[in-house]
Image (cartoon, rainbow, N blue to C red):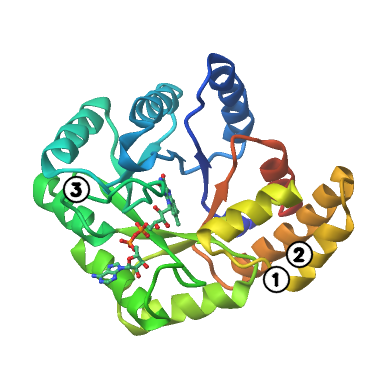
Amino acid sequence: MQETTSRVPLSFEFFPPKTPEGVEKLRLVRQQLYALKPEFCSVTFGAGGSTQEGTFNTVRDILAEGVSAASHFSCVGATRATVRTQLATLKAMGVTRLVALRGDLPSGYGAGGEFHYASDLVAFIRAETGEDFHIEVAAYPEVHPQAKSPASDLQAFAAKVKAGANSAITQYFYNADAYFRFVEEVDALGLNIPVVPGIMPITSSTQLMRFSDACGAEIPRWIRLRLQSFGDDVASIKAFGLEVVTDLCEQLRAGGAPGLHFYSMNQSVATLEICRKLGL
Ligand code: FAD
């Protein structure tokens, strides 16, 4: 009884490895994480289809291991014809879950393509494939960096839900209040969709700063200063990161978050330690 009440659905995100060694390493990482019985594992998709083969291969591997797999799917630069073909491939592979995104093309690439926003992609997937896929979309409790305003970003999120999204995964954040406020706003719009917080374990100071600057996730000043003060002391960074992220997850669970989605970065240790501390 106690076990079921404390259970929170978990999911893990991977990126497609670029080398045969990376593929083997990720296989081991997955086996370690499967001990936590994830609802599903998802695999990122390079904007413009740059990782399509690696993404689909990793998704195939996960399905072959008997675990539900979600393929991320970005539409920037894509045409209806290419998306239609990719959807048919995913369906034939047995995929039933997608994370539908706009994606970001590297600077220097013209956007082009026939889709402007993720909401266009969600609407297209629904029109083409009906209810064949469970569609996840991205959410930004701290506001997407290109949004005109927080209100317009919320409207953009609502458009994805109205186009047919079933649930959402957030960009990572370290401020639980931003998440709870966002969920309140989503509920106030009557959107009635689970918004699962995305969790980024902290294992390296420079990597975290680099990612966060790029995706607009805020690192609170007190966390930034503490991380900087550890310098190259990796053990202290990891110990501090474990404490901070476990505490965040506890707040999220206590506040009713419908699941936890871990950005694993193709590593198992930090996620396993956080989940162990959470008693999962
Ligand atoms: P959208 O929802 O389309 O929003 C993009 C911007 O456009 C926002 O600023 C929004 O406010 C604005 N907007 C939307 N609709 C309108 C409108 N009608 N009028 C005006 N403005 C509008 N990227 C990848 O390349 N591959 C991945 O696998 C990947 N996985 C991700 C997984 C998660 C859980 C998250 C949170 C992000 C992921 N990303 C990935 C990053 C994502 O592609 C970028 O954040 C991208 O900039 C936005 O994608 P989106 O789907 O949120 O876009």
Query: Splitting the image into four quadrants, where does ligand 1 fall?
Result: bottom left
Residue at x-position 52% and y-position 72%: 142
Residue at x-position 53% and y-position 15%: 20
In the image, which disc is placed on residue 224? Answer: 2
Label 3 neighbour load within 10 Å: few <14, some 14-19, many 20+:
few
> Residue 60 location in percent, x, y?
37, 24
Looking at the picture, tell me which residue is in the foreground, 108 or 183: 108
Distance, label 1 to label 3, CA atoms, is 37 Å
From this viewpoint, which residue is outermost toward the top? 20
Looking at the picture, tell me which residue is in the foreground, 108 or 52: 108
Which one is closest to the eye, mark 1 or mark 3?
Answer: 3
221 displayed left or right of 70: right
In the image, which disc is placed on residue 113? Answer: 3
Could you tell me which secondary element the residue under label 2 belongs to? helix
Q: Earlier in the sequence, mark 2 or mark 3?
A: 3
19 displayed left or right of 219: left
Distance, label 2 to label 3, CA atoms, is 38 Å
Which one is closest to the eye, mark 2 or mark 3?
Answer: 3
> Residue 216 location in percent, x, y?
53, 64
Distance, label 2 to label 1, CA atoms, is 6 Å
Could you tell me which secondary element the residue under label 1 belongs to? loop
Residue 3 seen = no
To which residue does mark 1 refer?
220
> Residue 63 location in percent, x, y?
39, 27
